[in-house]
Amino acid sequence: MLPIAAWPGETRRQLTGLFTDIDDTLTTGGVITPDALQALADLRAAGLTVFAITGRPIGWCQLFANGDDRRGIEPWPVDAIVAENGAVAFAPEQLDKNQLKPLSHRREKLSKIYQQSLNVRAHNQSRMQQIAALVQRSVPGVQLSRDSPGRETDLAFDYAEFARLPPETVQQVLGVLQGAGMQTTVSSIHIHGCFGDFNKWQGACWIVRAVLGRDLTQELDRWAFVGDSGNDETMFAHFPHSIGVANIQHCAARLKHLPRYVTAADRGTGFAEVARHILSTRAA
């Protein structure tokens, strides 16, 4: 990984969009930091499309996608939020837009869209309940993530958010999930399993096609990705402009695909550092 200062200004100047992970990339201690929130707003104000993409459940993303008028909570300044490692998203209802409105001009709420049909999701949810029970019988001490009630398309087990499980236990859980035919990923806090070919890269291609009507693979040189963990690997593998916030060093030795660049700061402050590097080319 090269320091972010080595990222050529000309390539940064060509960017039209950015994907970002949420946990430990935008957030610090589980909360988005003011500098990261401002960085999102600044990127969008500069004309970039900004998509957040996360392993978190779609229910957990509701508040960030649409805010809460009764509580005076504003939505995050992003154009869509892709959840559950790519299976479902909050996105604009008008999915044929070629140009998204600035947040300050957006009046419509973001709506849930899925990659799987309702029947497929219902069938998979029944199977996942059985597998969750199997994991908890087979690997003592493992618990579903606390955000599991908001999940619709995957299972998540806590190994580093509130629990502290050793690597060998993580591997045991992965073995049970894979033995049941599930696709698996590991984020900075959770072990995930799902039915379907879902990962962040596949989800990124889907949301660009659904919202913008374009093929992400044909314009990768105009997009960047920022992340920090194992479930970001598929993004690191595909995006030529991939950046890890500094805390990626904690798992770098376990990754086959690393980001090209790395920030000096970690978590939300690291994301703000990425935004400054991108925006500096607009001011030049």
Image (tube, rainbow, N blue to C red):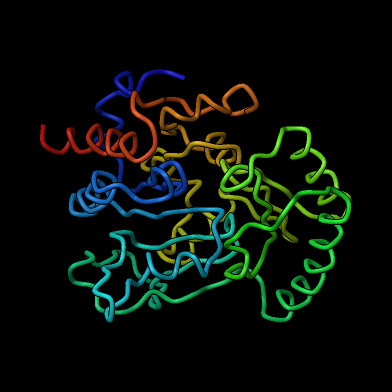
- Residue 223 vs residue 125: left or right? left
Q: Quadrant of the C terminus?
A: top left
**Does 106 sit left or right of 78 as displayed?**
left
Q: In the rendered view, would you say 51 is above or below 122?
A: above
Instruction: Name above or below for residue 75 compared with residue 35.
Output: below
Observer-nearest of 257 and 254? 254
Q: How many marks?
A: 0
* Residue drawn where x is 32% and y is 75% of the image: 68
Residue 149: horizontal and vertical position, in percent?
61, 70
Residue nearest the viewer, comparing 269 with 141? 141
For image coordinates 69% across by 39% down, the residue present is 165
Name the residue nearer the viewer: 245 or 242: 245
- Rendering quarter of residue 75: bottom left
Residue visible at 83% across and 54% down?
135
Q: Position of residue 280 (x, y in %)?
A: 17, 33
Q: Residue at x 42, y 66 (%)?
A: 211
Q: Is residue 116 left or right of residue 66?
A: right
Q: x, y (%) of residue 159?
A: 65, 44
Residue 217, given in percent of the width and then of the height, sits at 51, 46
